Amino acid sequence: MFLFLAQSLGRFVLVIWGAATAGFVALRLIPGDPVDVMLGVQARVSESVRAQIRLEWGLDEPLITQYFLYLGRLIHGDLGVSYQLRTPVVDVLAQQALPTLQLAAGAIFLATLFALGGALFGRGARLKKAVSVAELIVISSPTYWIGLLLLAVFSLQLGWFPVTGAQGISSLVLPSLTLALPVAGIVSQVLRHGLDAAEGQPFAMTARSRGVSPSGLVRRHSLRHAAMDALTLGGYLVGSLLGGAVLVETVFARPGLGQVAIRAIVGRDFPVILGIIVVGAVVFALVNLAVDLSYRTLDPRLRRVSVETRS
């Protein structure tokens, strides 16, 4: 377990370092002067004032020096200060993190529910075609289109849910559903195929010969084996939910990190953009760590292999 945790920690640090480095380089290659962002487009100041601002923000240093200074601050949890808001990036992101976390949690819950339902009920001869068509539709549809369609039907026509805002659980249903449907469609397909493959294995035939019912076979054996591939794909999709949240929060006019990201990109607020990139990398790395731990829970053979390797 110690070796496993050490390797996971190493991958965790490597992912964050890679994302921070790629983001830093990419943003520095964008033409433009950060001082113009701080002062505003209409500002008319002398070069001496501009030079003083560059000195205060460390923008007069060579690029490689700025990079190592940034990594040093990042190690201590300092994401810098917003050019526009003059506020620490950590505070800017913390103020808008809760709505995005609520949206992601709701999407994960609904995606898990729909994926299990689609995988289990879609195996029957009567429902398989209908479920497969539904999965194909949600996978092929752009996220913003799904959101607009849900808004048109359930908010504007039926009036069941609010059109915009983030007040109460009702305002969370449609945005979470918009994020969840494409994820559920993909995971459902993988999980159903895994169930079909698992039930063709020798352990399934042995279980049937002992009188295990079809539902008991799925619940006790097949689902655990089929969950491995679905969990891998689901972990990747959950880690990328932050990108989908940008579109969803825009369509539903919800507060959150998506709105912060859009304002930062439009305003060329590089520290905030880089902070969101790092936060996204941290989330992705944590999800992958959780997936690795889940592997060892679902398949005890992995724990035995680790013990044998260590011994």
Image: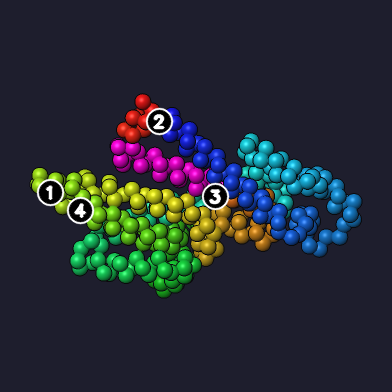
State the residue at coordinates (50%, 44%). Answer: 285
Residue at image mark 4: 200
Q: Where does the image place residue 269, in percent across and percent down from the top left?
A: 69, 55
Residue at image mark 2: 1
Residue 277 appears left or right of 289: right
* Residue kind at label 4, given as amino acid type: Gly
Quadrant of the image containing the C terminus = top left
157, above or below 182, in the image: below
Quadrant of the image containing the N terminus = top left
Q: Earlier in the sequence, mark 4 or mark 3?
A: 4
Residue at image mark 1: 208
Residue at image mark 3: 280
Q: Nearer the viewer, residue 128 or 308?
A: 308
Q: Is residue 289 magenta?
A: yes
Q: Which residues lie in the magenta part?
A: 278-302
Question: Callout 3: 10 Å neighbours few (<14), some, many (20+)?
Answer: some
Task: Say if residue 95 shows up in the picture.
Answer: no
Looking at the magenta stretch, what is its main secondary structure?
A: helix
